[in-house]
Image (cartoon, helix red, strand yellow):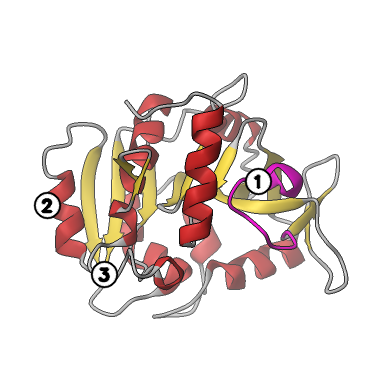
Amino acid sequence: MSFPDTAMVLAAGFGKRLRPLTEETPKPLVKVADRPLIDWVLDRLAEGGVKRAVVNTHWLGERIVEHLSHRSAPEIVYSHEEEILETGGGIKKALPLLGAGRFFAVNAKILWLNGKTNALHRLAAAWDDARMDALLLLQPTATAVGYDGQGDFALDPQGVIRRRREWEVSPFLYSGIQLLHPRLFENSPDGFFSLNVLYDRAIEAGRLYGLRHDGEWYHVSTPRHLAEVEERLAEVGFRSR
């Protein structure tokens, strides 16, 4: 199966937890190690072989469009939301721009470093079209930087996902990087809805799978997380290009 060369970049959120930094700056333009979050994401996509990125916008979306106007790779297409649609609704609106085949979807609030193999290539290689509607890259909770939650999922040796039970601390969290097929959105709600609605439906049908990330992963959700991420990047000697 050919490598999917299209991606959705989720960049429409308000970034409320990152205030006051996001009061006048859209969250995707908040800088980490002197480079805006969305550029970190687009750099990784371009390095992985993605040729076209659909970026959804809402809050201060014109600032994002202006910032990316001089970028040459990947090609950027916009899906503007007059009313914010959340993760599921935002991707569903953009489906006509994403094509008929599988595509990557990445949140514009995370950074990642590849392990021995490019994470996007690992997702593409692990995809089984007969079994999967969605394949999530999962980060071990214990090594996540800028994260202090209880995790999201458990993962069995075959890659089958189940939700964290209320009393559990799960070994994995959803990294914000995934490979999706448009059929995941068949008979989905209209308007505002979370991808979690579709994840739960896919879990019940046995068509949601996960893959463990083997590199470092960073989450920027609050000013404290931003400081933690920049400290860790300095420790590993990583600099933006």
Q: Which residue has dot 3 on it?
A: 58
Mark 3 → mark 1, Cα distance in angstroms: 28 Å
- How many residues crowd mark 3 within 10 Å: few (<14), some (14–19), many (20+)? some
Mark 2 → mark 1, Cα distance in angstroms: 32 Å
Q: Disc 2 or 1, which lies upstream in sequence?
A: 2
Figure quadrant of residue 25: bottom left
Q: Which residues are magenta?
A: 138-151
Q: Position of residue 154 (x, y in %)?
A: 81, 54
Mark 1: secondary structure: loop
Q: Disc 3 or 2, which lies upstream in sequence?
A: 3
Figure quadrant of residue 74: top left
Residue 144: assigned label: 1
Q: Residue at x 65, y 33 (%)?
A: 126
Q: Residue at x 73, y 49 (%)?
A: 141
Residue 46 in view:
yes
Mark 3 → mark 2, Cα distance in angstroms: 14 Å
Q: Disc 3 or 1, which lies upstream in sequence?
A: 3
- How many residues crowd mark 2 within 10 Å: few (<14), some (14–19), many (20+)? few
Q: Position of residue 164 (x, y in %)?
A: 80, 65
Mark 3 vs mark 1, foreground winner is 1
Q: Residue at x 39, y 80 (%)?
A: 191
Residue 179: assigned label: none
143 over 171 or under it: above or below = above
| The C terminus, quarter of image | top left
Mark 2 vs mark 1, foreground winner is 1
50 over 102 or under it: above or below = above
Residue 143 relative to residue 194: left or right: right
Q: Residue furthest top?
A: 116
Q: Residue type at mark 3: give it.
A: His
